[in-house]
Amino acid sequence: MLGEGILKGLAETAKNFAGSFVSAERMTTVQYPEERIAPVEAARVFPFLVYDGADWEAGMRCVACQICEKECPPKCIYIEKSKDKKPDALGKPQFYPAKFDIDVSVCMSCQICVEVCPFEAIKMDNEFELATDDRFGGLLQDRKQLAKSNEYYHTIHPTEAAEVDARLAAEKTKAAADAAAKAARPPAQAATPAPAQKPAGGGE
Ligand code: SF4
Ligand code: SF4
């Protein structure tokens, strides 16, 4: 029927309009900031750096490999690698970021930095109330501001954080088993000297 689609659309609009006065499901307006809706688990805003344990500096997972810095499309990550090394989550000596800045005024929340990080060191936060009147300094976050604990990660993305923990634990177990197997291996035997060659054409 000619105009059927328009009538259906108008009926839907009328139903939502009337329903918004009586149905909680259709009352979509929230009186922010007095009222707030808890972010869904998949919400992502800007990245943060995960650390393990109580000390953000010692427990930072980032090893300053700079992959995220290279892959970030708008180039809003700046990293300076340390001169010395500290043990990572597996106990292996690794570099760490002496400087790690993200300019969140440039970040486009694409999550590429998270996807390319081989160390589960950078994740997406759901914190969005970052408004400031300091356009430059106020939105340039340094490594201390970016550092957030693994417990915090679990509160905002529990499913994902549990998967990451399981993956890291499996890697740690495998590394320990490899190290134990290596330690138990007998030392390499000294190379057997090759038999002396007879001189060519030599008789007895
Ligand atoms: S989310 Fe995207 S734009 Fe933001 S820091 Fe990561 S890679 Fe760069
Ligand atoms: S956050 Fe990940 S990818 Fe970026 S420098 Fe640190 S370890 Fe490398």
Image (cartoon, grey):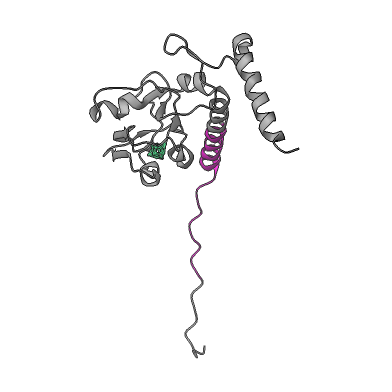
Q: State yes or no: residue 181 in magenta.
A: yes
Q: Is residue 3 above or below residue 125?
A: below
Residue closer to the observer: 189 or 141: 141
Q: State yes or no: residue 105 in magenta.
A: no
User: What x and y, as percent, mark residue 133?
Assistant: 25, 23
Res. 55 image quadrant: top left
The quarter of the image holding the N terminus is top right
Res. 60 image quadrant: top left
Name the quarter showing ligand 2.
Answer: top left
Residue closer to the observer: 143 or 16: 16
Residue at 49 percent of width and 14 percent of height: 30
Residue closer to the observer: 53 or 134: 134
Residue at 51 percent of width and 26 percent of height: 43
Residue at 32 percent of width and 24 percent of height: 145
Residue closer to the observer: 56 or 49: 49
User: What x and y, as percent, mark residue 156?
Assistant: 50, 21
User: What x and y, as percent, mark residue 120?
Assistant: 47, 34
Q: Is residue 123 above or below residue 68?
A: above
Residue, far right = 1
**Range drawn in magenta:** 170-194
Q: Quick check: can you spot residue 141? A: no
Which secondary structure class fits the magenta region best?
A: helix
User: What x and y, as percent, mark residue 184?
Assistant: 54, 40
